[in-house]
Image (cartoon, rainbow, N blue to C red):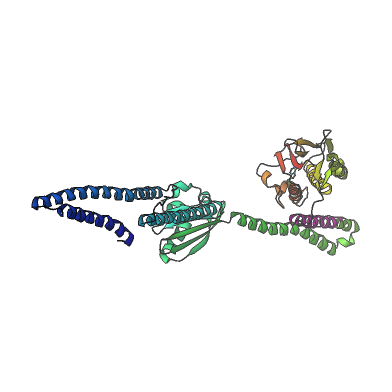
Amino acid sequence: MHQKLRRRIVAPILLLVLFIVVSMWLYVGRSGCDMVCVRQGIVISGVIAAGLAFLLAHLLSQRLNRPLQDLIALANQIRDGQRYNHIIAGQSDEMGQLVHAFNQMAEQLDARLTTLTQEQQLLALVLNQMGDGLLFADSSGKITLINPAAARILNTQEALIIGRSVAEAVRHHELIDLWHRCRQTGQEQSMAVEVGTDLFLQAVITPFKDDDASGYLLILQDLTHIRHLQTIRRDFISNISHELRTPLASLRAVVETLRDGALDDPPAAARFLERAELEVDTLTQMVEELLELSRIESGQVPLKLARTAVPDLFFDPMERLQPQAARSEIELVLNLPSGLPLVLADAARVQQVIANLLHNAIKFSSSGDFITVGAELVDGETAVRFSVEDHGIGITAADLPRIFERFYKSDRARTRSRGGTGLGLAIARHIVQAHNGRIWAISKEGKGSTFYFTLPVA
Ligand code: ADP
């Protein structure tokens, strides 16, 4: 027992003993005290000493009891995860020191709990925000944790997966094989997997083992977008080769025909030269459009944005394309409401968009048709919507979502005779998007198409 506490208990006992001895001595020391008197002395001193001992014990237990009860209450608060209150240590004795130590322990516990909670929140944030799917499985293969990205990739809900086996969670034979391989070898395994028709994943399964836990970590990276980009690039190269091959083959045929004797027939030679010129024009246009597209895509041509009147954007392309429309006996109609606000635009670029749309409208219309171009205020007067409406061959529902892709030409047989590189709309889309606008089309096969794009009001 500690020195101080011992002193505190021993001192009253010694006092009591002293009291008994002194009172006995006084009582018995009187003259004429016989045996009866001695016995009486012992009894009286004993009774008084017992009373005093009881009083002392009561006071002492009171003194010890209160801080003890406080300690019990504090321990209960900590156990229940409540915020705790400091106990006031009123004494400087052992009990005071115990209270002080307990307060310190509670404080440290609280600080550790706060750090742990913060770390947990940070981890949850990372898991929730990360684009890659992540699953933890314990050593028996039961899923213990799954993040929202993994639930999205596996097309399930987090709550349904916890506690299930990896095979039940991933539901894909190649992923299940990968998982079995990882279990058997105890080595990290990875592979690229195609799930369904539109999901391309890179899956990595890593076993882990430390003092506290062991299990498996599954990472699912959604590479669909990258794969899509790769496909676009591959298609782009194959498209460009295809588009170059036709005019080049035609040029070669012309040259061979001329060399094989057509040169000696001046009218035929002139016809062939005309055809060669046409093919060279097509090639030149394609190269120019490709250069333009790559310049726009790489952001090499910064927009020269200025407050521009809407009619100014129409006049130049309409004037340029009027002769072509007239040749095909197509009427161009401009339908502009008065009082349109100025728009924020790079005029030359937007004129190019309108020219591309108008050029297509003429190309895909028949003689006698008319084309209406116009603009109106939309989106709560924050944007102007431009439109080019024709009554030509229209676009099929299957082609419509793809016409803004590079080199896309709907139904090649139908459109071949009309020429074109399939780049015009891709360029238009880039220009409009660089203006923070949108471009889209509605169309009905055989009835005609309307192309729209918006520009923000200045
Ligand atoms: P192109 O130089 O071939 O016209 P675009 O990118 O301008 O290339 O157009 C892509 C394809 O979209 C065209 O080949 C055509 O099939 C379709 N298209 C575009 N505009 C129209 C239209 N007004 N009417 C019908 N089809 C159109």
From the viewer's side, name the closer residue of 127 and 425.
127
Task: Please state the extent of the stretch shown in magenta in the rendering.
Answer: 274-299
Q: Is residue 24 left or right of residue 73?
A: left
Name which residue lies at 34% across and 50% down.
68
The N terminus - image quarter? bottom left
Q: Is residue 296 magenta?
A: yes
Residue 140 picture quarter: bottom left
Residue 52 appears in the picture as rendered: yes
Residue 171 appears in the picture as rendered: no
Name which residue lies at 85% across and 39% down.
311
The C terminus - image quarter? top right
Q: Is residue 101 magenta?
A: no
Residue 192 image offset from top left, x and y in percent: 54, 60
> What is the count of numbered marks?
0
Q: Residue furthest left?
A: 35
Q: Residue furthest right?
A: 266
Name which residue lies at 72% across and 41% down.
441
Residue 252 image offset from top left, x and y in percent: 79, 62
**Vertical order, 160 against 184 (above or below):** above
Residue 8 image offset from top left, x and y in percent: 31, 56
